[in-house]
Structures are given as C-alpha cells and as structure tokens.
Amino acid sequence: MLALATLFLGMFVIGSTELLVVGVLDLIATDLGVSIPAAGSLVTAYALGLAIGGPILTAATIRANKRSLLVGALALFLLGNLVAVLTDSYGLFLVARTLIGAIQGLFIAAAFAAATAIVPPERAGRAMAVVISGTAVSGAVGVPLGTLAGQALGWRGTFMAAAVLAAVALVATLALVPSVPSTGEGAAGQARYAFAPRVLAVLGVTVLIFASVYAALTYIVPFLQTVTGISGGLISVFLFAYCGAAAVGSFGGGRFADLDAGRALTMGTIGLAASLLALYLVGAVAVLVALALLAVGGFAMGMAPSMQYRAITLAGPGGALAQSLPASAANAGIALGSFAGGVAVGAFTVSAAVTAGLVIAVIAIPAAWATSFLKPVPAPCAA
C-alpha cells in the first residue's frame, strides 16, 4: 500500500538524520570549532529530545488529525535541518538537534497511529513493522550513504540532502496518506492507561533489550579490532551485517507480533542472549563473529514490532498516547547500555562490553516472560 510506503519513507529520512552526525563528527567539530566530545553531544541532545520531548509533543497534540501531524512534523524537521546547514553557532545547532529529536518522537507516534488505522486489526503488527523498518533500513543504508556523502559534500551538504529528502517525504505524505482523525480521550484521560504498571513493565523490558544490544554494539569496533583482529574497510562489512539483519528482522517481526507479541518478546530475548553469548565465545573467529552479529541484529530488531504492539494494546484506551513511549524507552536503553558497556570496558577489557550486554539480556528473559501474561486494560463502560 502506497500510504504505508510513504510512512516507511518518512521514517527512513528521519532515522538517517538521527545518526548522521556520527559519520561526520570530525567535520562538524572542525567547522564549528568545538571538540569531538562536544560534537558528540549533538547525538545525546537528539536522543534526549526524542525520549523526553516526543511524549510531551504527542500528549499536546493527542486530538489532532494524524495526517496533519505527519505533515507538520516533516515540515518542522525540514526547517530544523536548514537551520543546521545555515548556522555557524554550535549552541543553535545543539538546540536545533534537540527540537528535531522531539519532532521525530511526534512523527513516530503519528506514523504508528496512521499505519494501524489504514489496515485491518489482524495486520496491525505488520503495519507497525513497516514503520519500524524505515528506521532499521536507515541504519543499514542511510547512515553509511550519509557518511560517504559527508566526505564528498561536506557535513552541510549532507544535511541539505536530508532536507531535500524530507521535502520529498512531505509531498508524498500530502498526496498519499489519508486523513486519520483522532479517537479517544484527551491526554489527561489517556495518561492513567498509557502509564499503567502493565505498560511500564513492557517499557522496562524494552529498556533492557536495547541496553543489552548497545552495551556490546557501542564498543563493537574496538572488539573487532582487538579480539577478532580485523581493521580498515572490513569493519564496515561486519557493521553492515548487523544493520542488514536488523532491517530484515524489524520487517519480518511484524508477523510474530500479530501472532503472539508476548511470546515473541520472550523467545526473542532468549535468542538475543544466545547470540551475545556466541559473540563472546567465537570472538576470535571472523566468520563466526559475522554470523553472531547477524543473529544479534535479527533478534533485537525482530522484537521491535512486538514491543510497540504490546505497549499500545496493554494501554487500551490510552493507546494513542502510548504510541511514542517505546521509542523513548529504546533511547533510554541505548543510553544505559552505552554507559554499562563503557564501565565494563574501563574495568576489564573490551570483551567485557559483550559480557555486560549478555548479563542484561539474561535479566531481560524472565522480565519478558512475566510480561507475556499481562492483559490489556479494559475500556471504561459508557455511561
């Protein structure tokens, strides 16, 4: 369906820009006259904007038509990137990145609402998977291409290209995405359902899953260099293996979400833990490391549609507000995982980052199993 393809495109464009800074970090630091760590704060600012600002914007616009929100978010996203292209101020760039992150959180929630509204209920998980796979494919394709563009066009040229793609997605959204009126109560009425303990439990599992992945993934390059013994351009092949598997997993995981999302999370966390254990055990064998990274990417992102599906369905009448919460939980997990991996590496060796990820994944297994028994909140009876 063209509408779902358009939502995929929007997620791809916005997802690519989220990590675009990583590939041109040195260029930004030199051009703006700041240190590499300061330039790296642009990534942190974006993640915080998404994790905190996304739910706030979603709550503030809960009654708006979702198509209008998608159009507005893409227009603001485009303007934010133009600010990044034109400014010489690091401070203004930092503010722009924070606001763009919040806008992405709003776009994600509206995209999920629109996707599930235009398909039959029994295909909701697969519709969510299409939206999620836009972000996963951006990691596999968009970020590497953006990095290459940065070397050829400079970092400003790369952000200008992102703005142009956002304009294309904006026009496509206007032409192909149907009107999706808001349903349900306002934000205040939905909050008690969206933040109910059963929803928070699934969000906690989401935090653990992403923390386990990023404890290892944040330090995967030094792991490949020192443990596996590879360097140079070959490292990109291993990273592409992970990203490619993540993209395929995010799309294919929708069917498992439709069948039984709770069970999918339980089995997925078991698979993720086994994959991280394999990565640790076969770290010195390049071919087996590539296979382990394929498994990590496939299991991790294969669970993403189920995380989204469970959070929304368990929220019941608060599902519209809950749309943006899994993305916030995922970003919190990324921050936690990166921190845990860094502590492990600092205390031991680079292999300890994988061990840290494995420990968190093992903790996630019983947590995911426990949440599989949770049932949706019943809708209140009409007076």
Image: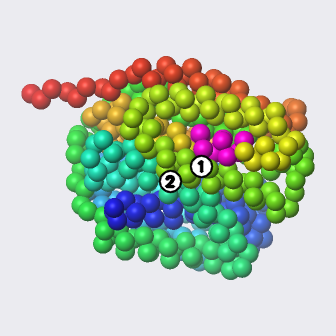
Q: Is residue 227 above or below residue 20?
A: above
Residue at image location 49% in from the left, 19% down from the top: 370
Closest to the observer, 257 or 205? 257
Query: CA–CA distance between discs 1 and 2?
Result: 8 Å
Residue at image location 39% in from the left, 35% down from the top: 259
Residue at image location 38% in from the left, 54% down from the top: 111
Q: Main secondary structure of the magenta part?
A: helix
Quarter location, residue 278: top right
Q: Is residue 177 magenta?
A: no
Residue 166, position in %: x, y? Answer: 47, 71
Closest to the observer, 38 or 248? 248
Residue 38 shows up from this direction: no
- The image's colour scheme reads rainbow
Q: Which residue is mark 1?
A: 246
Residue 84, position in %: x, y? Answer: 59, 71
Magenta part of the chain: 292-300
Q: Please tell me how crowded label 1 is: few (under 14), some (14-19), or many (20+) other residues with Cα within 10 Å.
A: many
Closest to the observer, 205 or 247? 247
Residue 271, position in %: x, y? Answer: 62, 32
Residue 268 shows up from this direction: yes
Type of the residue with mark 1: Ala
Judged from the image, the secondary structure of the residue bearing numbered disc 2 is helix
Closest to the observer, 171 or 73? 171
Is 1 left, or right, of 40 in this rendering?
Answer: left
Chain-order first, disc 1 or disc 2: 2
Looking at the rendered structure, which numbered label has been put on residue 133? 2
Residue at image location 43% in from the left, 75% down from the top: 168
